[in-house]
Image (cartoon, helix red, strand yellow):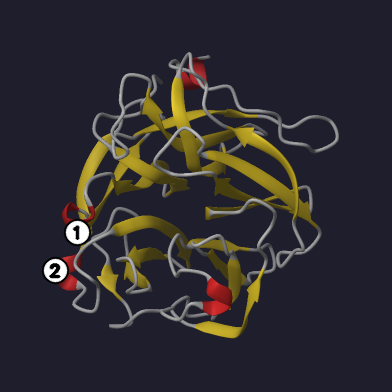
Amino acid sequence: MPNPCFPGWYADPELHYFAGRYTIYPTFSAAYEEQTFFECFSSPDLVTWTNEGRILDFANVPWSTQRAAWAPSCCERDGKYYFYFSAGDGAGIGVAVSDSPTGPFVDAVGAPLIKEYHHGAQPIDAHAFIDDDGQAYLYYGGWKHAVVVRLGEDMVSTIGEFVEITPENYVEGPFMLKKDGKYYFMWSEGGWGDSSYAVAYGVSDHPLGPFERRAKILESDYSVGKGAGHHSVLQLPGTQEYVICYHRRPLEEEHHNHRVTCIDRMEFDGDGNILPVKLTFEGLRA
């Protein structure tokens, strides 16, 4: 599987394995005014990718800003697929639903799921996580603040308080991974438009933290690509292997929106620490 995974400018990818296929939900990396929709890509094998077309269009989300469609997240519960999305800079986080992981998705609420700036967090970059006990959480936040809130059983409502969990150097792009009973909270730091962009993580015994920054594990490699960040992680089905799906900027590109989606291996040491990720052109064949 070569990197990038597919042609075109795409960023903020979330990778899943749904219904026997891999699916990537990215941001279309373009000027804000051109970001008026979401697409997804599917694959049977992480090698051959198909663009499934537009799965949600802001023309059908009248409360959105009709621009700046950013950083989606998808999860499955009881045969339904729930799609959380940033509906423009300032409009809030929305949620849409479908019977298929590749959509089309329909706005489920008719209004933002989260609009307020709790704890100073811009309501963008949602990430949905369902714990082993069935409790679902929504992690999100821009403007250097990370927040988590429990989702209702209907997956289209929140319950309880909004908890700030901002770790050191957090900027945006939260992601939660659970492994061996530990909660690995991951995030992007640095500036998304330049080579300082990177991914770091912390670990806790609880989904609400606290999360003390442990290490940076993904960053620019000036022999491969720069500005590597805003990622997701997937344990390959039936294995103990993990992959990280992220965006980076090709070495020859200077425009901040010229970002491509890539997948590489992510490994742990014997103490459960995430090892630094090696950026490759070969992908999983590396």
Helix, strand or loop status at disc 2: helix
Picture layout, residue 242 above or below residue 146: above
Q: Can residue 144 be seen in this view?
A: yes
Q: In which quarter of the image is the N terminus?
A: top left
The crowd level at tag 1 (other Cα within 10 Å; few <14, some 14-19, many 20+) is many
* Quadrant in which residue 254 is drawn: top left
In the shown orientation, is residue 269 left or right of residue 253? right
Q: Residue at x 22, y 54 (%)?
A: 35
Q: What residue type is labelled 1?
A: Thr
User: What is the distance, in whole Å, between disc 2 and disc 1 at their CAs?
Assistant: 8 Å
Considering only vertical position in the picture, is 193 above or below 134?
A: above
| Residue matched to label 1 | 36
**Picture quadrant where residue 36 is located:** bottom left
**Which residue is at the front of the view, 64 or 122?**
122
Q: Residue at x 45, y 59 (%)?
A: 125
Residue 181 screen position, x and y as percent: 79, 53
Q: Residue 158 carries which label?
A: none
Q: Are marks 2 and 1 in contact (CB under 8 Å)?
A: yes
Does any portion of residue 182 appear in the rendered image? no
Percent x, y of residue 250? 36, 24
114 to the left or right of 258: right
Badge 2: residue crowd in 10 Å (few <14, some 14–19, many ≥20): few
- Which residue, given by chain and number where applicable, does mark 2 sit on? 59
Q: In which quarter of the image is residue 132?
A: bottom right
The amino acid on which the numbered mark 2 sits, given as a three-letter code, is Ala
In the image, 56 versus 65, the foreground residue is 65
SS for dot 1:
loop
* Residue at far bottom of view: 160
**In the image, residue 126 lies at what x, y percent?**
47, 63
